[in-house]
Amino acid sequence: MADKSPVERILAAIRAIPRGQVAGYGEVAHRAGLPGRARLAAKVLSENTDPKLPWHRVLRSDGRIALPEGSQGYREQCQRLRAEGVMVVKGRVRGLKAARTMDEQVWGPPG
DNA sequence: CAGGTGACTCTAC
DNA sequence: GGTAGAGCCACCT
């Protein structure tokens, strides 16, 4: 990875998320080389405006959508996830979860 | 330099 | 299993 800015690295990590799968802010931040910067990832997404960026694959540690229910972003994320084969119920995501437990097997361990 | 904010995370009930 | 409150850390004004 090039010596890009932390924001660029976060965006790259999000772009690296496989389709039909989801990841948490902490995971994305850690993958971006910024452990503990989950908040930064959140702000980055809030500032992000790239339609090609799979930001909808980024969820909270609880596997829940970060945006408030009823918001435009919430609906967009929910619909996009469903379109990728991800089940979304009550603002929660069912199926694979990239939490800090069994994510390594789906994300791929370092190496 | 200090204050305020947040698409977060963890622990406890 | 879910909700509620406190904590933490970096970024912005």
Image (cartoon, coloured by chain):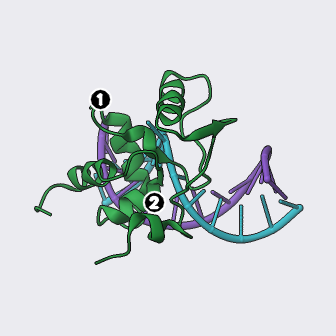
Chain colours: A green, B cyan, C purple
Q: Mark 2 or mark 1, which has the lower sequence index?
A: 2
Please tell me in which quadrant of the rendered image residue A55 appears. top left
Check if mark 2's residue and mark 1's residue have beta carbons within 8 Å.
Answer: no
* Side of A52 relative to A76 (left or right): left
Q: How crowded is mark 1: few (under 14 residues within 10 Å), some or many (20 or more)?
A: few
Q: Mark 1 lies on which chain?
A: A
Up the image or down, A36 lies above or below A96; here it is below
Dot label at residue A26: 2
* Side of A23 relative to C2 (left or right): left
Mark 2 residue type: Gly
What residue do we see at 47% from left, 50% from top?
A: A22
Mark 1 residue type: Pro
Element at label 1:
loop
Up the image or down, A53 lies above or below A102; here it is above
Q: x, y percentage for residue A32? A: 30, 61
Quadrant in which the N terminus of chain A appears: bottom left
Residue at mark 1:
A51
Q: x, y percentage for residue A71? A: 55, 23
What residue do we see at 27% from left, 33% from top?
A: A52
Q: Which chain carries label 2?
A: A
Gap between marks 2 and 1 measured at Cα? 22 Å
Quadrant in which the C terminus of chain A appears: bottom left
Q: x, y percentage for residue A82? A: 53, 33
Judge by depth and name the residue closer to the eye, A21 or A9.
A21
